[in-house]
Image: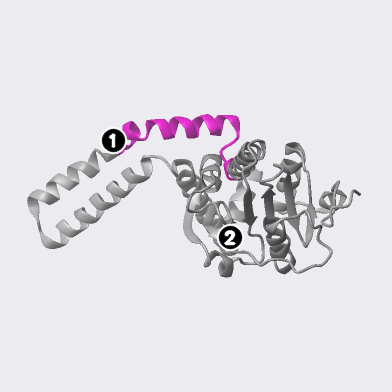
Amino acid sequence: MSFINEFTQFTNNQWIRMVLNVIDILLVWLVFYKILTLIRGTKAVQLLKGIFVIVIVRIITVYLGLTTLGWMTKQVINWGFIAIIIIFQPELRRGLEQLGRGKLFARSNLQEEEEQARLISAMSKSVSYMAKRRIGALISIERDTGLNDYIETGIPMYSEISSELIINIFIPNTPLHDGAVIVQKNKIAAAACYLPLSESPFISKELGTRHRAAIGISEVTDAVTIIVSEETGAISLTINGDLHRDLSIEEFESRLQRVWFGETTTAIATSKWNWRGDKK
């Protein structure tokens, strides 16, 4: 009992109480944040907007003295708790399951990893498809250096990245196939963009305009650029002025994962080929 009394006296200290109040507020904020991330992208978001509208209407009816409408909104709010349980049953069930598995607070990291895996998979599928059919492609991925100047030369898209969309863009004789696709974060920002051509005299003569453009953009920015050769179907990647040629799909995936999402680029330097076309 003495321990409990001492602990109670300790928590009743003014400064300690202020710290605990701040922690209390932060914990409530964290709970609401996790709830919002849990229902994000579901129908529950639209339902929450509807509930918010009802609350606003209720406040307005009180101030304006609208008796009948006020009574209706009051009944809706009074029975709203039961309605929320029924309407949000799938989200509540999923949240309780994740809480039971201890995954609720790890959801953000998990979502980020899943999104990265999805983007790599989309790029890999599209590049593999185009390489097998020798469909030429040029895809530049923005990192720290902005590519807005080059995005403005193309057709704005701001679309979700998918293998089907990327393949469709580069199908020959379509309006967007001639030029580069530029990716910002997890969106296709624009297609049919013009990239600066490298003027280096050391580039192999067998390389075409796509490879020169990929090297050119990597010389003036830190962008990662993917090239699929129309003549050979070979997969290449440029970064920091270097061209890494004839990558297998497995090599392409691992290298793209490292350079796109901020991991070390040391392994890129060990590529089988350098940008002059000489075997290392």
Which residue does the numbered mark 2 point to in the structure image? 19
**Local secondary structure at mark 2:** helix
Q: Position of residue 228 (x, y in %)?
A: 67, 47
Residue 233: percent from left, percent from top = 69, 42
Proximity of marks 2 and 1: CB atoms separated by less than 8 Å: no
Quarter residue 106 falls in: top right
- The mark total stands at 2
The residue pinned by badge 1 equals 83
Residue visible at 55% across and 34% down in the picture: 99
Disc 2 or 1, which lies upstream in sequence? 2
Considering depth in this image, is 17 or 176 the residue closer to the camera?
176
Q: Check if residue 82 falls in the magenta segment.
A: yes
In what quadrant of the picture does the N terminus appear?
top right
x, y percent for residue 82: 29, 34
Q: Main secondary structure of the magenta part?
A: helix
Residues shaded magenta: 81-109
- The residue shown at (24%, 56%) is 56
Closest to the observer: 154 or 141? 154
Residue 249 picture location, percent across and down: 72, 38
For residue 222, say whether it is visible.
no
**Residue 9 appears left or right of 157:** right
